[in-house]
């Protein structure tokens, strides 16, 4: 009886340990991309009806699909903003545990399909799953709230693999049902995974990898079915990715690398991923990877050549050894296939740990299988003891890492200190020092960081912003910063810093010199070579100019910039916000003119693209117009 239920008891114990270890990290705060992705919860008030739900879930910007399934899942935890991060992190942990259960099931089905006997298959499945669940590398995905997107894509990928393998087992008895179920689950789970995060579209390719490495060729799905449901969607993804192939010198103006340099760099990065997965560590550089050294050629740095050669040998060896060592083959090919979208030709940022959450699902199968094979040479109890030691070490590392993630300020300081070449890291240290009241020290720290990284627009704008906070900024500071950012590479973080600066000086416009000097920054930035290639710049700049003119009490010039901004945003919500900004400071004539333009956009916009119902927009526009007319009439009487 005990032996019969032992696998279930072991899995439950591993899940319980995992829950206990991660619990210490649930008290951490929001980080980086959490804010832009979640703050929309408060844009429309409390999300408490279908129209607001649709508005939030259809307004995603993290990827081409908008990732509506992931966004919908966040409403489980909160329906407004600001809010507490704890429920989000708790749900992420529950998804991680559920993924562990699905991984164990998928691995068991896979091993049985590969002709492993049940006892061996169960043992290997449990150990490989335990290693994945308790591995410290998974902490950054689980406790970084916005990476629920990666978790959900993995969840639906695993569901698809489980469903496919379950249906495949019917091929020899009920082939019609088997093909129908395999097709249904593959299509459904691919769509669900893709609309959670785009790399979920790789599910058919991952199933092809499972089939390719399968040493059991009996009752293999017929080639016609594989061609339609596996090969065709996989080739479609590869064809789509070919469109991203470019040999231009500067294909992504907001990146400091081209496509060839990205591929060279990813060779080193993927090798580093493998090293950190197989040789776990407590904490690495985390989210501060913007200082990663780009590979400019195969020999600059020389580790690019070594890494490329290593990965090439590893890839070729899977084909040579797949019949004799199928678990080795699937662990490596599955890892490579899962990285195909995020670690090749698409111009994403270079390095993120969460890209390994799906890729590492079967990576530990060879290790678990090797541990089981030791039973032929040493006592079973000694093998089990070795497994316990391995899991204990992983648990300790994960606990220490989760504990660090539970203290967000300490975590960011740690990342910053070990990432001296990361502008984002140095920006965070300066912010912490400023928040602690160590103003002069914070400025000096930024000045030293700028000496090391003179091309960082983020650090230069941040230093100017801090001087403004302290009311010690001079006109020369503005001029020098403007001169630097005219030629510096600009990214989203630098743009956000500039926006913060403008909003601060216009909200607290006691010093009109700061307001006027801010316009110099905007006009200079528009001369930056990246300007025409960065849509965020193009639509934000006229909006910031409008706020500056508004602070200078120049309503007609402000209106002109607002009108330009509305055209570029082409968004009713953004337009109504601008109308409110004009009207709230006593310029009803200009606000009514702007409202007419917003209404025109509203009338031309497809109803399916609206974030609220037509009835709500009609009512809101009418209400605002009435308020502005009354404001105008009151002003005329007085």
Image (spheres, rainbow, N blue to C red):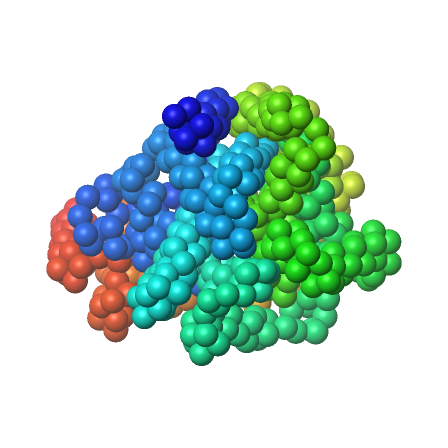
The location of residue 467, given as percent across then percent down, is: 61, 34
x, y percent for residue 448: 76, 35
Let me know if residue 288 appears in the view.
Answer: no
Q: Nearer the viewer, residue 496 or 299?
A: 299
Residue 28, position in %: x, y?
Answer: 47, 27
Vertical relation: 512 (above or below) 570: above
Q: Nearer the viewer, residue 135 or 368?
A: 368
Compared to 596, does 414 lie above or below?
A: above
User: Residue 137 appears in which quarter of the rendering?
Assistant: top right
The residue at the point 55 percent across, 61 percent down is: 216
User: Residue 393: x, y in percent?
Assistant: 64, 25
Q: Quadrant of residue 307?
A: bottom right
**Residue 320 visible in the displayed image:** yes
- Residue at the location (74% across, 52% down)? 268
Q: Say which residue appears at 30% left-offset and 37% top-offset.
A: 78
Quarter of the image that includes the N terminus: top left
Question: In the current view of this chain or complex, which residue is farthest to the bottom?
Answer: 224
Position of 551 with respect to 345 (left or right) is left
At 16% from the left and 62% from the top, the residue drawn is 614
């Amino acid at each position: 009886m005990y032996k019969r239920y032992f696998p279930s008891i072991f899995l439950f114990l591993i899940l319980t340990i995992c829950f206990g270890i991660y619990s210490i990290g649930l008290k951490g705060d929001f980080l980086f991309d959490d804010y832009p992705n979640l703050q929309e919860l408060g844009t429309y008030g409390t999300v408490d009806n279908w129209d607001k739900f649709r508005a939030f879930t259809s307004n995603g910007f993290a990827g081409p699909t908008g990732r509506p399934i992931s966004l919908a899942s966040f409403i489980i935890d909160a329906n407004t903003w600001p809010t507490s991060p704890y429920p989000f992190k708790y749900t992420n942990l529950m998804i991680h545990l559920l993924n562990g259960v699905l991984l164990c099931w998928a691995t068991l089905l896979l091993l049985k399909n590969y002709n492993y006997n049940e006892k061996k298959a169960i043992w290997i499945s449990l150990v490989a799953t335990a290693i994945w669940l308790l591995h410290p590398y998974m902490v950054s995905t689980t406790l970084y709230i916005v990476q629920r997107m990666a978790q959900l894509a993995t969840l639906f990928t695993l569901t698809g693999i489980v469903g496919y393998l379950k249906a495949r087992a019917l091929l020899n008895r009920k082939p019609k049902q088997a093909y129908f179920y395999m097709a249904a689950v593959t299509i459904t789970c691919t769509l669900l995974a893709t609309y959670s995060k785009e790399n979920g579209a790789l599910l058919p390719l991952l199933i092809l990898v499972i089939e390719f490495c399968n040493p059991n060729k009996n009752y293999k799905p017929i080639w016609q079915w594989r061609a339609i449901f596996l090969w065709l969607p996989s080739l479609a993804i590869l064809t789509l990715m070919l469109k991203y192939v470019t040999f231009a010198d500067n294909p992504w103006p907001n990146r400091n690398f081209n496509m060839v340099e990205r591929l060279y760099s990813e060779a080193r990065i993927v090798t580093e991923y493998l090293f950190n997965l197989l040789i776990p560590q407590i904490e690495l550089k985390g989210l501060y990877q913007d200082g990663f050294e780009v590979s400019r050629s195969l020999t600059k740095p020389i580790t690019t050549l070594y890494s490329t050669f290593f990965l090439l040998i590893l890839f070729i060896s899977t084909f040579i050894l797949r019949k004799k060592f199928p678990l080795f083959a699937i662990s490596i090919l599955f890892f490579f296939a899962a990285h195909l979208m995020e670690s090749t030709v698409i111009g994403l940022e270079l390095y993120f740990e969460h890209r390994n959450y799906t890729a590492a699902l079967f990576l530990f199968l060879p290790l678990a299988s090797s541990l089981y094979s030791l039973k032929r040479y040493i006592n079973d109890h000694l093998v089990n003891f070795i497994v316990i030691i391995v899991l204990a070490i992983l648990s300790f590392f994960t606990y220490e890492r989760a504990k660090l993630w539970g203290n967000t300020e300490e975590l960011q300081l740690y990342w910053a200190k070990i990432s001296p070449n990361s502008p984002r890291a140095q920006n965070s240290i300066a912010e912490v020092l400023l928040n602690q009241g160590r103003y002069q020290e914070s400025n000096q720290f930024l000045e030293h960081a700028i000496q090391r990284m003179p091309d960082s627009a983020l650090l230069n704008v941040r230093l100017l912003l801090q001087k403004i906070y302290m009311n010690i900024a001079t006109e020369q500071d503005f001029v020098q910063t403007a001169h630097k950012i005219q030629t510096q590479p600009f990214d989203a973080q630098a743009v956000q810093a500039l926006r913060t600066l403008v909003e601060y000086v216009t909200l607290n416009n006691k010093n009109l010199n700061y307001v006027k000097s801010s316009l110099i920054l905007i006009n200079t930035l528009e001369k930056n070579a990246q300007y025409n290639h960065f849509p965020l710049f193009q639509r934000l700049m006229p909006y910031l100019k409008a706020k500056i003119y508004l602070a200078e009490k120049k309503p007609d010039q402000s209106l002109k910039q607002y009108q330009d901004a509305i055209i570029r945003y082409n968004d009713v919500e953004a337009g109504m916000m601008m109308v409110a900004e004009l009207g709230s400071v006593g310029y009803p004539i200009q606000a009514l003119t702007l409202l007419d333009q917003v209404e025109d956009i509203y009338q031309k916009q497809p109803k399916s693209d609206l974030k609220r119902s037509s009835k709500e927009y009609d009512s809101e526009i009418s209400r605002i117009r009435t308020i502005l007319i009354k404001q105008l009439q009151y002003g005329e009487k007085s």
